[in-house]
Image (cartoon, rainbow, N blue to C red):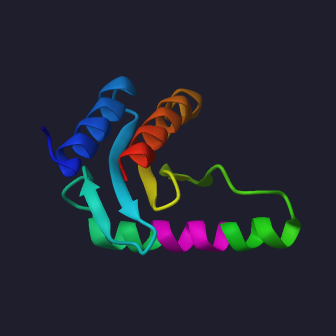
Amino acid sequence: MESRQAQITAILERLAANTGNDVNGVAAVGMDGIVLVSRMSADVNADRVGAVAATMMGVTRRVSGELRIGAPQETIINSLQGTFLVLPAGNQSLLAIALRQGANLGMVRLEAADAARDIGMLI
């Protein structure tokens, strides 16, 4: 039987394959910011991405609570040179995705939701 890390790696690779060249990097991250599995580009520090993703989701959850709008489904930073998307993957982990500028956000969001669900079931 494959290890949990190998199973998560397969999920991340499937996400990247199904979104073409829109995804620059992807990581599964614990709620504490510790990277479980990363497929980030070589010029990106995956540990920093994990810490930032956990911080983003923490802040998003606090804001959602204050506004009484329910649990967040995703957090998106859209910038001039790309997009960064963070989704909960179950109760104990997150899925962080770096996208190229001009990426098909709709398709990535669909694939990301499936990947986050699958990761959440593993962890």
Q: For residue 55: magenta? A: yes
Residue 9, how many percent across, how many down?
23, 43
Q: Residue at x 18, y 57 (%)?
A: 42
**Residue 85 seen by the camera:** no
Q: Quadrant of residue 7?
A: top left
Question: Farthest residue in the front direction?
Answer: 1
State the residue in front, 90 or 100.
90
State the residue in front, 122 or 37.
122
Residue 31, how many percent across, how many down?
46, 69
Q: Residue at x 53, y 59 (%)?
A: 91
Residue 52, how many percent across, how many down?
46, 71
Q: Quadrant of residue 68?
A: bottom right
Q: Magenta stretch: give its range.
A: 53-60
Magenta residues, dominant SS class: helix
Counting labels gives 0
Q: Is residue 44 above or below residue 76?
A: below
Q: Is residue 44 above or below residue 14?
A: below
- Left or right of 72 on screen, residue 25: left
Residue 86, how many percent across, how many down?
52, 54
- Left or right of 91 on screen, residue 122: left
